[in-house]
Amino acid sequence: MKVLKALAAAMLCLPMLASAEEIGQVSTVFKVVGPNDRIVVEAFDDPKVPGVTCYLSRAKTGGVKGGLGLAEDRAEASIACRQVGPIQLPDNLKEGEEVFKERTSLVFKTMQVVRFHDKKRNALVYLVYSDRMIEGSPQNAVTAIPIRPWTTE
């Protein structure tokens, strides 16, 4: 029981991260056994900045290992974030704060999206990158959203 309470307390301490909704996918490599390799397009709303949605495209490995969740996905990803409503910046916005994270291998590799606020240019900047426990990847993508008044017309 103590273990369950400790686990529940640890979960509450985790940062609030967005969860992605799959928008679509395309097959890139046919696999005889298991799912095909594919590119998946997902969308997620920034959990701390209402009015921002990010679209992430990334490779998903298929085959038997991919079907069982044992394959390591590639590090390449693309991101595009857009203003979809009025943007309200909270007072407690942290530079480089993680807004999305997903495992891309069974244990060692994750893909992350972090947010920066470029105050000088009045923009939000989102960076997607992949890291490993031992060695990360320099492959990354960036997108920026100018913060503008939102009109309903």
Image (cartoon, helix red, strand yellow):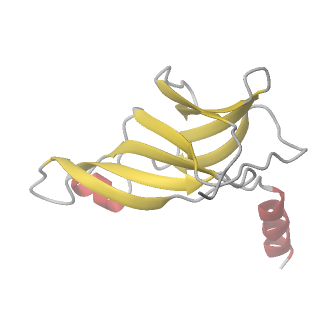
Residue at the bottom extreme of this rendering: 1
Which residue is painted at 19% across and 54% down in the image? 36
Q: Is residue 64 above or below residue 29?
A: below
| Horizontal relation, residue 5 to residue 30: left or right | right
Residue 32 x/y as whole percent:
9, 56
> Which residue is more in the foreground, 48 or 67?
48
Classify residue 114 by image quadrant: top right
Which residue is painted at 34% across and 51% down in the image? 40
Q: Is residue 9 above or below residue 136?
A: below
Residue 125 x/y as whole percent:
64, 31
| Horizontal relation, residue 36 to residue 110: left or right | left
Residue 22 visible in the current orientation: yes
Residue 133 x/y as whole percent:
58, 33
Name the quadrant of the C terminus.
bottom right
Q: Is residue 129 above or below residue 28?
A: above
Residue at the front extreme of this rendering: 153
Which residue is painted at 41% across and 60% down in the image? 22
Marks counted in the figure total 0
Residue 142 x/y as whole percent:
53, 28
Residue 108 visible in the current orientation: no
| Horizontal relation, residue 72 to residue 84: left or right | left
Name the quadrant of the N terminus.
bottom right
Which residue is painted at 26% across and 49% down in the image? 38
Q: Is residue 149 above or below residue 50?
A: above
> Which residue is more in the foreground, 101 or 87?
87
Residue at the right extreme of this rendering: 91
